[in-house]
Image (tube, helix red, strand yellow):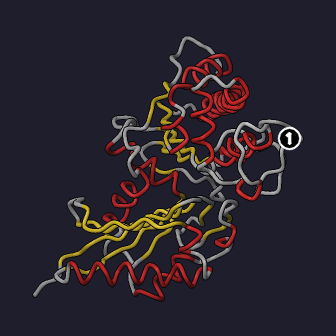
Amino acid sequence: MRQEPALLVIDIGGTNTICETYDLGGRELTSETDSTARVFSQEVEGFVHHVKGVIHCHMIRYPHTIIASIVVGVPGIVSTDGSKVISCPNLQILDGVSLGEELYAATGVCTHVYKDSELAAIAEQQMGAARGFTSAACVVIGTGIGCGLVLNDRIWRGEHSLAGELGHTTIIPHGRICTCGRRGCLEMYCSGKAFGRQAIELGIVAIDQQRKDDPNLARLVFDTAKRGDSAAVEVITNGFTLLGIALANLVNVLNPGIIVLGGGVMSGGSVFWPVIEESYRESVRSSAVSVPAIVESQLQAKPVTKGAWVEAKRIVGGC
């Protein structure tokens, strides 16, 4: 009996890791979400074992299919050939790991690795808020900050795969120490872990200091701000003001057709959207030409895996 191709897509986030399988038509077949800490509890070897288990479970449920390609999204910089993670500040266990090669060796399945925000940008341009635009910037704010760039209908990584590192642009000279080792990065002021850490430091939320980098604490900050707590409002306002400036800088350099904001932090902080807009409008270069709009993601539910499906379908038979 002929086996139909199926696609495995993986979104490795700073908090959770999602593994899903799809058919070529985009129908979701299986889905599994686990904490990233648990998936990598035995380092990269444990992750590879986890992926093999996902494939095994898929084959039990859908024996008439075969996994034809794997696409992995990671919160870091990836080599241009999609085989190696160059740097991953929020999951440093992946630094320098040839993840594509590791998975191919273990499964025999063609595997490509992407920056997660690149996959989100692909999804937004093909089926989301950036549909119809030939250029777009997709900024994903979760545990950290990622930015995927589509220029002339193609993902733009730059000469050395460093394009789109918006979260690690300096926004406060000599500011807070970032996980990347530098100071004053945007990610240290406007991300899930940044909001949570600042809330603990200011006593907005009473949580053990050992959890100060837990991105889930951001939800508590937003809830506290919505109840009128002035300190919480200040933390969010400061972070989103800096985000608006960073987006203006992005437009002043690249001038994408549209900016799409997504990620868990944006879904929780939508009430503070005007803060971003005001800061952005004040900072972007004004001219007779219209300023690119900032819009909310239409794919808040798993934009990375949706983009991964697009790419996994494209590379079937490509290894």
Residue at 83%, 44% in the rendered image? 176
- Answer left or right for 318 relative to 241: left
Residue behind mark 1: 175
Please indicate, yes or no, whether residue 270 appears anywhere in the rendered image. yes
Please, what is the three-letter code of the amino acid marked with disc 1?
A: Gly
Q: Quadrant of residue 173?
A: top right
Residue 9 lies, with reference to residue 272, above or below; the image says below
Q: Give the quadrant of the N terminus.
A: bottom left
- Answer left or right for 221 relative to 39: right
Q: Position of residue 235 (x, y in %)?
A: 71, 31
Describe the element under mark 1 as helix, strand or loop.
loop
Q: Residue furthest right?
A: 174
Q: Position of residue 225 (x, y in %)?
A: 62, 28
Q: Quadrant of residue 80?
A: bottom right
Q: Nearer the viewer, residue 109 or 58?
A: 58
Please indicate, yes or no, whether residue 164 appears anywhere in the rendered image. no
Q: Nearer the viewer, residue 249 or 53?
A: 53
Residue at 86%, 41% in the rendered image? 175
Residue 162 lies, with reference to residue 125, above or below; the image says below
Rate crowding at label 1 as few (under 14), some (14 to 19) or many (20 or more) other CA atoms within 10 Å. some
- Answer left or right for 194 relative to 270: right
Q: Position of residue 252 (x, y in %)?
A: 64, 28
Residue 49 lies, with reference to residue 27, above or below; the image says below
Q: Give the quadrant of the C terminus.
A: bottom left
